[in-house]
Image (tube, rainbow, N blue to C red):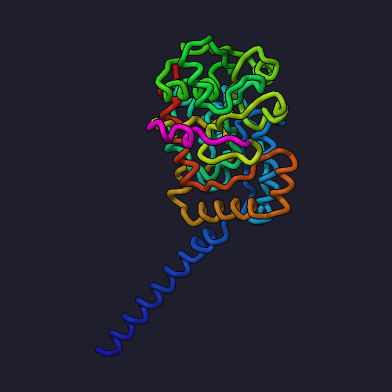
Amino acid sequence: MTSRKTARGLAAALSALTLGLASGPVAAQDDNWPDRQITFVVALGPGGSADRVARLVGQRMQAELGVPIQVINQEGGGGHVGNTYFLNMPKDGSYFLASSIHPYISSAILELGADYTLDDFAFVNGQWTDVDLFAMNADLPYETLDEFMEAVASGERRFRVSVVPGSTGHINTVLMLEAYGLDENAVSIVTYQSGSAARTAVAGGQVDLSVLGADGSLSIAEFIRPLAVASDERLDDWDAPTLSEILADRDAEVRPLVGSMRGLAAHAEFRDNHPERFERFVAAYETALQDEEFVASLQAQGIGTEWLGPERTTEIIEANFEILQRFQD
């Protein structure tokens, strides 16, 4: 009887060992990820800001991940073509979307009837985000946004504001007016087809205020007075408070719309099915942006180097989606 128990025990042990050996290569394969080339998909054309970020970050992350990273462009439809291409690629961590992850994905969903949602993407980081600057012509006598808006509300004259039509600056102008209890007819919103033309207008005094990207407005800094920035934190390059700071005493809660956010996203299925691999990729990206030499090289080229991480990046994109949904017409 004892020998039979022993035999059964040995058989069970051998069976367990066999199962262990069979499952070993799968576990090892997962531990060794990535073990092949990774592809970054840019949903915009070559040479642009999103493309530059993708290529520089990809080159740096190769050292962290130990595999080559190639970058391909799939442009068209305001990012929709590239987004669709990416979502149709394998969801095993061999493809990532390295593009302007906002607002192009949201815009495609709201305006083009895309058959995907934000939930199909696992956002990793928004590295470089355009922030709108509320800037007044320097010859005007007002020192703060409150003073300027008091003049607008008084009706002493009809002030002119330059924006690019349909831009974040256009929407942020309307949100700012609402926060002061005014509608968009309280000012003359003058639209220009390029940020350059809109900036020239405020610098030359053809308009009184502009709401445009802060980085691009550095070229006219001597001709304007910064009044506010549409962001959660102040910007190093501009001595101006945030909209939230200004409006805190007015009991007006405004969540400004952020501009183009260049960064990385994975497939949501990759994050959910391979959480350890996803975290490994996130850590590699964060490590790259902690490299002082790499960060300095990006900043020297005027490229943002912010680390928001998956949770904060997703939170911003989802909150901005709600704003875009309201203004989608």
Up/down of 186 relative to 268, above or below:
above
The N terminus: image quadrant:
bottom left
5 over 66 or under it: above or below: below
Would residue 195 be seen by someone viewing this image from the given angle? no
Q: Residue at x 67, y 15 (%)?
A: 205
- Please tell me whether the stretch drawn in magenta is mainly helix, strand or loop: helix
- Provide residue 259's location: percent of width, then percent of height: 56, 30
Which range is magenta?
A: 239-251
Return the residue nearer the eye: 256 or 160: 160
| Residue in the image at 57% along x and 22% along y | 77
Q: Nearer the viewer, residue 208 or 154?
A: 154
Residue 240 among magenta residues = yes
Query: In the picture, which quadrant includes the C terminus?
Result: top left
Task: State yes or no: residue 136 in magenta.
Answer: no
Q: Nearer the viewer, residue 222 or 39?
A: 222
Residue 47 in view, yes or no: yes
Q: Please indicate whether residue 197 sits to the left or right of residue 308 in the image.
A: right
Q: Position of residue 180 (x, y in %)?
A: 43, 23
Going 69% across and 19% down the picture, which residue do you hit?
203
Query: Looking at the picture, does residue 236 appear above or below residue 158?
Result: below
Q: Residue furthest left?
A: 1
Tell me the quarter of the picture where residue 140 sits: top right
Q: In terms of image quadrants, where is residue 298?
A: top right
Image coords of residue 286 (percent x, y): 59, 52
**From the viewer's perspective, is residue 201 above or below residue 169?**
above
- Measured from the top left, where is residue 173 in percent x and y? 51, 21
Residue visible at 66% across and 23% down?
A: 138
